Amino acid sequence: MDQEAKRIALYVQRYKLLREIGELQIEPTADETAFLNRCCSLLLQDPEYCLIWVGQEEENGQITPVTTAVQEGLPARQCRGLVTRLVTESSTTITAAQALATGAPAICSNLAPAQGPASSPWSLLTAITGSRSCGSWPLVHDQQKYGVLTIHSIREGGFAGVELDFIANVVATVSRSLYLRHTSRHLRLEQDFNCEIVQTVQALLISLSHCGEILSFNPTAQEVTGYLEAEVKGKFWVDVLISPDKRAESQNQLSRVLKGGQSEMNFQAELQTRSGDKRMIEWHGSIRPDIEQGRVGLVLFGIDVTGRMAADRALNHALARWENIFSSVQDPALIVSGQGVILDVNPAAVAAARRPREEIIGRGVCEILHGGRRPGAICPLEVLLSQQKSRIFETELRGLRGNFLLTVSPLHQYDGQSGAALLLARDLTDEQLMKAEAFRAAQLAAVGELAAGVAHEINNPINGIINYAQILIDSNQLDHNVDFLHRIIKEGKRIAGITKNLLDFSRKRDQSAEPVSVPALVRCCIELIQHQYQLEGIALSEEYASDLPPIFCNPQQIQQVLLNVFSNARYALNERYPTLHVDKRLVVAACRKRRDDQEFVRITITDYGAGIEHDLMDRLLEPFFSTKTKGQGTGLGLSISHSLIQENKGHFRIQSQWGKWTTVTIDLPTAEGSTT
């Protein structure tokens, strides 16, 4: 009877253990290993169990012990070492390997005390623990393997009858708990991953209820809108995400999608932030069904495209500017591929080639610019294009009918392809005309020198003729034809006056500076141009300060400067006012100024004509640069004038406002502060 009572007590104990192990399913232990340790410790409360361990199968089939528990009083460290040796040295013969291989329990009910060599793990383990039977059960739930549980018992023939049912329940409970723990951990990881995506995604992510109320608002949505999630939860989505003037339209669009049964929707809408800024958002909406409630909701995924749209606008503007500049260039311009195929041309190139644009695009650059080549010949321009090098050189382009300065500039990319280049051909005809003008100026200078020599040669005989005629008159030897002698003298003096004027034109009579009255100098110039001004309706006024001192200068040089300025003013006035007009006028003024402790007289000549463009002001004093139309000027007048003023120790500058006026200011030193 005592034996039966022990068996009943054992059953009660095992039932209690089973209940405690079942309670571990909901106990928040630290991790899986701690859970298995706790289960093994509870099983060891059964007095018949001396050693319990759990192993896991690796990818190579090797079993690795996860936890090992022994009855109190046994050497735990030595037992763990023997279990490790056992799974290493007998990995295919032990019951744990058999259970994992078959998926069913593997039991050895009679372990002899001296089974195997005395030094084997089995022998040592049975000797130390006193185990007489052992069994292994695979930990499997829902076709998922979680390891193997091995129990050593001190009773021979153990693991039979009711005990097998007890252990089967324990294994099922442990396996189910491991499954729940794995599933819970997987769900937590997935939830954490999803939450991390929602929190870190660089887009607005918003979930809505079936009636359009905001349920969640990720950090990007908060950053873009300026609203916190707590502030917008429960609010209607259009009141937060859509500009006031677009809310009705967006709401109707959402209603149509929901009623139509569509699973997705895409739209673009303007969002007004908390600060009042406008942002353009590209929305993608996905239906989120709630089966239990029989309702649907919506997840909105929004991308802020404001910057992209601004960049697109800037790109389109830049492309439009490029097209405008490319088309407006007055010199022939071509875009050519690295293989020498023409990709684009501007109107100037079309006009120069005298072909329709359609006949140029897609043709070889050598064919269009050079008019073709002989068979087998190599085009140097095509070689240069293939090398992607920048070059500037003069060349004859027979296809454009002239000599050109050709600039080759490689492009980083054009229309999605690399290797293209920009060719700009500047017609050298204008340059040649400038050279001709310069050559003509040199010729005129030579003619001037020649005229001076001729005038000297003429002066000598004319003076002799005049003198001899005067001698005849003074001798009173001729009573008749005296009148003819007076006529000879008169005409001779007339010829002398012509040669004197020719000398004045061809060379300077006196290179030295002298005191000069500004009003007298200006009026001398006005007398030369006044008739032309009157014919063209140009009003000229003079304003001189009462205390104006004389200036110290070379009067011929300053007269040349003033005449050049008056000529430019006349051109500008006629350009703005081709006919009579009340504002077609020129004002000459002079006053006393002081600069760097030196006295100057400032002469200003202001015309109210066409003016000069701002971007041309820095080039006005360059030789051969002119704002006049072709054939109207050499571009040397202002450059020479500036040099002449500097020679006279003065200052020369120009101010202008396009379309309104131009003022030329000339500062010349006074005679009072100068020495001869």
Image (cartoon, grey):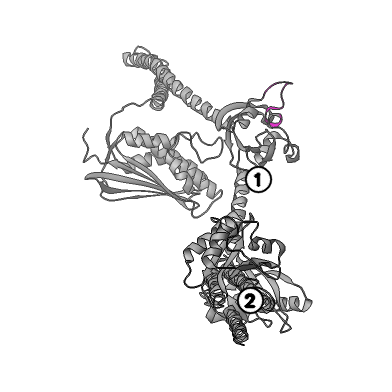
Check if residue 264 falls in the magenta segment: no
Badge count = 2
**Residue under pointer 1:** 416
Picture coordinates of residue 289, whole percent (x, y): 72, 77
* Mark whose residue sits in front, 1 or 2: 2
At numbered mark 1, what does the secondary structure look like: helix, strand or loop?
loop
Inspect this view and state whether residue 441 appears. yes
**Of pointers 1 and 2, the one earlier in the residue sequence:** 2
Residue furthest to the top: 477
Picture coordinates of residue 229, whole percent (x, y): 54, 78
**Residue under pointer 2:** 170
Q: Quadrant of residue 422?
A: top right
Q: Quadrant of residue 365?
A: top right
Picture coordinates of residue 215, whole percent (x, y): 61, 79
Residue type at tag 2: Val
Name the side, left or right, on which 333 lies relative to 446: right
Residue furthest to the front: 1
Residue at horizontal 39 percent and vertical 22 percent from the top = 496
Please tell me which residue lies in front, 20 or 4.
4
At numbered mark 2, what does the secondary structure look like: helix, strand or loop?
helix
| First to last magenta residue range | 367-378
